[in-house]
């Protein structure tokens, strides 16, 4: 079968170098033979990239939530000292009042 490719010499030379062939026709045959396998690999890798990007987004959301929770915990922990001091005074007052009954 005769197939004619209309291409530049630079492209044919590059294809020969990439396939390790000495003639342009052999280089095109090798490239065409590998196309289906390589296309399937590209599709699989694109699917893997999409899955990893989704996983990365979930991890980012988890980290953001954890950071927000940690900031809230630090804020509340520093306020709890004040709350405990106040509550301690009120607790003493309540104990005093309870002992009257």
Image (spheres, rainbow, N blue to C red):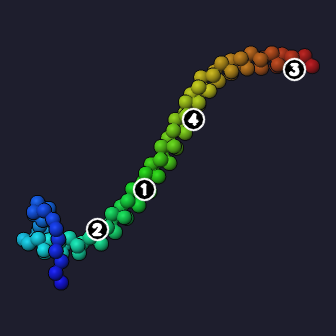
Q: Nearer the viewer, mark 4 or mark 3?
A: 4
| Number of the front mark, 4 or 2 | 2
Distance between the Cα atoms at labels 2 and 1? 18 Å
User: Which label was assigned to residue 69?
Assistant: 4
Which residue is at the front of the view, 30 or 10?
Answer: 10
Is the C terminus in the top left, top right, bottom left or bottom right quadrant? top right
**Which is more toward the observer, 12 or 94?**
12
The numbered mark, 1 or 3, whose residue comes first in the sequence reads 1
Marks 4 and 2 in Cβ contact (< 8 Å): no
Q: Earlier in the sequence, mark 2 or mark 3?
A: 2
**Pointer 3: what residue?**
98
Looking at the image, residue 28 sits to the left or right of residue 78; the answer is: left
Identified at 52% across, 35% down, the residue is 67
In the figure, is residue 99 to the left or right of 86?
A: right
Front-most of 101 and 90? 90
- Chain-order first, disc 4 or disc 2: 2
Q: Position of residue 5 (x, y in %)?
A: 17, 71
Q: Compared with residue 73, is residue 89 higher up or lower down, i.e. above or below?
A: above
Residue pointed to by mark 1: 50
Badge 4 marks a residue whose secondary structure is: helix
Question: Going 13% across and 62% down the picture, which residue do you hit?
Answer: 8
Q: How far apart are marks 2 and 3 (CA)?
A: 83 Å
Q: Position of residue 68 (x, y in %)?
A: 55, 34
Image check: 22 left or right of 71?
left
Q: Which of 73 and 47 is in front in this view?
A: 47
Tell me the distance, in whole angstroms, between the alpha carbons under discs 4 and 1. Answer: 29 Å
Question: Along the polypeptide, which appears first: circle 4 or circle 1?
Answer: 1
Residue 38 tag number: 2
- Residue 63 location (% of width, % of height): 49, 41
Q: Which quarter shows the N terminus?
A: bottom left
């Amino acid at each position: 079968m005769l197939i004619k490719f209309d291409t530049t010499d630079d492209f044919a030379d590059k294809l020969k170098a990439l396939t390790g062939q000495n003639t342009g026709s052999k280089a095109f045959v090798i490239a065409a033979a590998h196309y289906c396998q390589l296309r399937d690999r590209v599709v699989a890798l694109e699917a893997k990239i999409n899955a990893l990007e989704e996983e990365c987004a979930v991890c980012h959301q988890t980290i953001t939530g954890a950071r927000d929770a940690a900031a809230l915990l630090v804020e509340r922990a520093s306020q709890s000292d004040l709350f405990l001091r106040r509550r301690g005074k009120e607790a003493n007052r309540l104990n005093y009042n309870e002992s009257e009954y």
